[in-house]
Image (cartoon, rainbow, N blue to C red):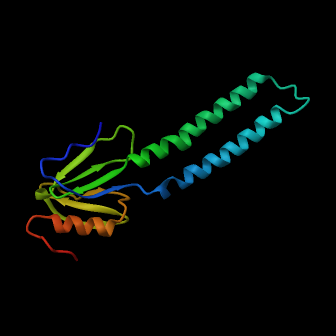
Amino acid sequence: MGLPRLGQGERVRADMTSPPGTVVFPFLEAVVTTGLVWMAVGYLDGPGSMIDPLLRNALVAVWAVLLVWRFLLPVVRERRRRFIVTDRRIIARAPSLKSRVDSIPLRDVHSVRRHKGGISVAVFGLDRPLYFPSVPRGKKVEGLIQQSLPGRQGYYR
């Protein structure tokens, strides 16, 4: 499922995704896992080794599964995270493979503020604000949303 299409005359003011720094730990984990597993494979392939080749192939298969599970899936999830502010609405997609897209019209937004590294958006008709964790450049995004709110053009705290 992709992001919703923009309306006629709708302009994107900010389009944020997870920064590349969020995939550093999975990358380092993949490097360490690869090093350890392939050292073991090298030992199994050593001269005079009487180890069954099936064990070596099983070790390579385990390495491939670990690489997909601990590196590729986290990277794909994090890079799918999106937070878009247009002149009419906020569009947010969570960091998962089958995530739904939230689209909040700015006319329904009461207020917005940064909270613990994310953005908290108070929407009319909801008991509690919606919280979007880990939004990059939170101060800038908060200011853009504040400026875009109806009746508050030019307001920036």
Residue farthest to the front, as pictured? 9
Quarter residue 43 falls in: top right
Measured as percent of width and height from the top left, residue 149 is found at 14, 64
Quarter residue 139 falls in: bottom left
- In the displayed structure image, the side of residue 96 where residue 153 appears, left or right: left
The vertical placement of 150 against 157, above or below, is above
Quarter residue 114 falls in: bottom left
Residue farthest to the right, as pictured? 48
Measured as percent of width and height from the top left, residue 115 is found at 32, 66
The vertical placement of 54 against 79, above or below, is above
Quick one: quadrant of the C terminus? bottom left
- Residue plotted at (65% across, 29% down): 61
Measured as percent of width and height from the top left, residue 60 is found at 68, 31
- In the displayed structure image, the side of residue 67 where residue 107 appears, left or right: left
The answer to whether residue 124 is visible is no
Front-most of residues 107 and 5:
5
- Residue plotted at (16% across, 64% down): 148
